């Protein structure tokens, strides 16, 4: 199966970690002039995504957009050796920003919900334009896991990522299903199954107005979770919402990263900064600030 429209999802909206800085945690620097959310953006572009959807809160969206802009260039096209004057063959990947409502922030604020919200919005908007633009897969990249997309072989595994229904990056046999911030590829059936599982687990009955029952209080372990995704083992955690994907992890759809650091805590962030590994910002042509030409603008 060959992908026709792989969509990148970057879940930014979620509970804050223990950094307590004036800016959002996804804007933590991981290199000189290189931010964590920019690394995720480069990873999605390297994986061959046709568009990238960043799910974030309204109060942080202007700053993130001011840094990232509305488009990124495909790094793989620039690295092609069989094409002369590669900049003439560049492919622009648009960036869209998906807001999280105040109601959702109050009851469902988590990276899991950001993934679901981003996938659903991308599907709805894309299908409304044409059935040919409907997403055929979702590549999820977390800003809070640091590893090199180039050294991880994201570009080399691009064909496998596109041809497999699911794909996982791992480290020490752990994937995103183990609450590690490693990229994975999902399909809409996986999103729907996770959403159904969350709705059946949480009480309330009415979609959008559920809450956690007293029986689930023992699941909440936010302070002691190195891979914090709201609820370590609760209904809004990766290892619960997407637990059905464990049976799909196989040797032919899994790739081991060479090095990886979880920077969702100050201790993990210090460990990364003190390590021998580093992240280098791509050339300016890839991450240069760009704004897309609007389809329609009414001058008042």
Image (cartoon, grey):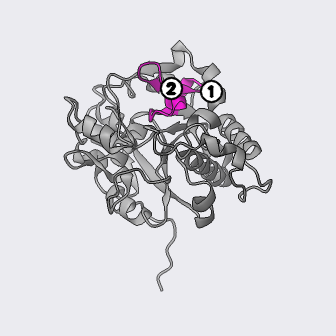
Judge from the rendering whether residue 37 lies leftward or rightward of residue 281; answer left or right.
right
Whether residue 291 can be seen here? no
Residue drawn 58% across the image and 33% down it: 239
The quadrant of the image that shows the N terminus is top right
Against 57, residue 167 (above or below) is: above
Asked if the stretch drawn in magenta spans residue 113, the answer is no
Tag 2 secondary structure: strand
User: Earlier along the polypeptide chain: callout 1 or callout 2?
Assistant: 2
Asked if the stretch drawn in magenta spans residue 172, the answer is yes
Crowding around mark 1 (Cα neighbors within 10 Å: few <14, some 14 to 19, many 20+) is some
Residue drawn 50% across the image and 34% down it: 179
Tell which of 72 and 212 is nearer to you.
212
Farthest residue to the top: give it. Answer: 251
Tell which of 249 and 166 is nearer to you.
249
Q: Which residues are magenta?
A: 162-184
Residue, disc 2 = 168
Against 251, residue 201 (above or below) is: below
Determine the image quadrant of residue 215.
Answer: top right
Tag 1 secondary structure: helix
Is label 1 in contact with label 2 (beta carbons under 8 Å)? yes
Whether residue 96 can be seen here? yes
Residue drawn 22% across the image and 34% down it: 278
Judge from the rendering whether residue 166 lies leftward or rightward of residue 189; answer left or right.
left
Tell which of 61 and 4 is nearer to you.
61
* Residue 244 in the image, given as x and y percentages of width and height: 66, 28
Residue, disc 1 = 245
């Amino acid at each position: 199966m060959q992908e026709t429209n792989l969509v990148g999802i970057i879940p930014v909206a979620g509970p804050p970690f223990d950094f307590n800085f004036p800016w959002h945690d996804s804007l933590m620097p991981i290199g000189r002039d290189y931010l964590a959310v920019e690394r995720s953006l480069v990873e999605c572009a390297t994986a061959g995504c046709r568009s990238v959807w960043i799910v974030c809160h309204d109060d942080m969206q202007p700053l993130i957009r001011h840094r990232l802009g509305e488009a990124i260039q495909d790094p793989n096209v620039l690295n092609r050796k069989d094409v002369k004057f590669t900049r003439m063959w560049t492919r622009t990947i648009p960036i869209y920003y998906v807001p999280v409502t105040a109601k959702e922030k109050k009851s469902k604020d988590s990276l899991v919900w950001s993934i679901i919200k981003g996938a659903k919005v991308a599907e709805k908007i894309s299908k409304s334009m044409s059935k040919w633009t409907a997403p055929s897969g979702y590549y999820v990249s977390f800003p809070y896991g640091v590893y090199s997309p180039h050294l991880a072989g994201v570009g080399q595994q691009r064909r496998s990522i596109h041809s497999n229904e699911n794909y996982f990056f791992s480290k020490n046999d752990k994937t995103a299903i183990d609450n590690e911030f490693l990229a994975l590829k999902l399909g809409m059936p996986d999103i729907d199954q996770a959403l159904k599982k969350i709705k059946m687990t949480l009480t309330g009955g009415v979609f959008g107005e559920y809450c956690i029952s007293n029986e689930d209080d023992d699941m909440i372990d936010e302070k002691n979770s190195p891979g914090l995704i709201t609820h370590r083992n609760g209904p809004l955690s990766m290892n619960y919402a997407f637990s059905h994907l464990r049976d799909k992890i196989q040797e032919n759809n899994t790739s081991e990263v060479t090095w990886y650091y979880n920077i969702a805590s100050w201790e993990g962030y210090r460990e990364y900064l003190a390590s021998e590994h580093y992240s280098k910002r791509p050339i300016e042509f890839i991450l240069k600030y760009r704004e897309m030409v609007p389809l329609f603008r009414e001058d008042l």
